[in-house]
Image (cartoon, rainbow, N blue to C red):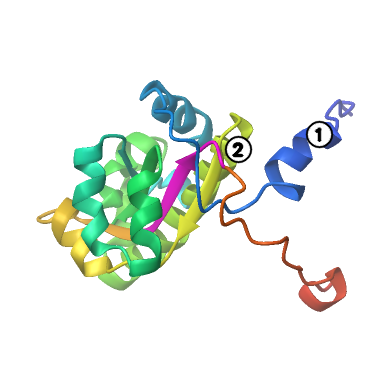
């Protein structure tokens, strides 16, 4: 039997990823290098998805012009902070993800047919795209950045503005940068284990 050599990450790393990480409403105004988008993706892409389907699609808005296209579709409470954030990411998913299955799942390329029904494609794309969006936020935190995910936006407007004529659909929006204390809510409670979990 091969001896397991894995060890838990240091406590400070776990704090950075989860325990002291926060949902930020404001960020330092310094621009971030566009190369960070590549760094985040190259880390998060290794997270698992069903049949390696990888339906997540991510649009990194890094310029004032790009943010101005998104802003009209954000709710009133989210518009100003979206315009001020260094990077906005449209967390999306591709309903046509199965077209990539022969590349992503080469040992069983015919498995693209598993997703031929629109309702199956939709469920798979949304579930696994959501997983990948979460991986992206954890990757950003791992690289020393902070996140501000938001669901207050007009989905149809974002889809029309950015994804017209494609199979891409918006899931949620996430601001990324170096967070500040401005408008930062006090730490909110979480459910205890016994209320959220079962061991059977």
Q: In front: 164, or 30? A: 30
In the figure, residue 64 lies in which quadrant?
Answer: top left
Q: Position of residue 2 (x, y in %)?
A: 86, 26
Residue 175's place in the image compared with 178, above or below, is below
On whether residue 176 falls in the magenta region, the answer is yes
In the figure, residue 138 lies in which quadrant?
Answer: top right
Q: Which mark is residue 12?
A: 1
* Mark 2, residue position: 141
> How far apart are the two marked residues, 2 and 1, measured between alpha carbons?
12 Å
**Can you say which quadrant of the picture contains the N terminus?**
top right
Residue 122's place in the image compared with 15, above or below, is below
Q: In front: 157, or 113? A: 157
Residue 197 appears left or right of 88: right
Q: Residue at x 14, y 60 (%)?
A: 160
Start-end of magenta stretch: 171-179
Residue 55's place in the image compared with 60, above or below, is below
Q: Residues within 10 Å of mark 1 (few under 14, many from 20)?
A: few
Q: Position of residue 102 (x, y in %)?
A: 31, 39
Q: Residues within 10 Å of mark 2 (few under 14, many from 20)?
A: many
Residue 20 appears left or right of 194: left
Q: Secondary structure at mark 1?
A: helix
Q: Secondary structure at mark 2?
A: helix
Quick one: which residue is furthest to the front in this view?
182
């Amino acid at each position: 039997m091969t001896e397991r050599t894995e060890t838990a990450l240091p406590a400070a790393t776990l704090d950075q990823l989860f325990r002291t990480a926060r949902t930020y409403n404001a960020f330092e105004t310094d621009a971030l290098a566009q190369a960070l988008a590549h760094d985040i993706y190259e880390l998060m892409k290794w997270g698992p998805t069903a049949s390696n389907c990888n339906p997540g699609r991510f649009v990194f808005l890094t310029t004032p012009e790009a943010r101005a296209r998104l802003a009209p579709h954000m709710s009133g409470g989210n518009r100003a902070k979206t315009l001020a954030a260094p990077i906005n990411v449209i967390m999306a998913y591709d309903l046509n993800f199965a077209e990539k299955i022969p590349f992503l799942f080469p040992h069983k390329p015919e498995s693209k047919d598993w997703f031929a029904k629109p309702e199956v494609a939709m469920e798979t794309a949304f579930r696994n795209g959501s997983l990948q969006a979460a991986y992206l936020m954890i990757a950003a935190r791992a690289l020393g950045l902070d996140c501000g995910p938001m669901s207050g936006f007009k989905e149809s407007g974002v889809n029309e503005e950015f994804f017209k004529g494609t199979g891409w659909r918006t899931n949620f929006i996430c601001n990324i940068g170096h967070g500040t204390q401005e408008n930062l809510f006090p730490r909110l409670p979480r459910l205890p284990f016994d209320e959220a979990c079962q061991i059977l």
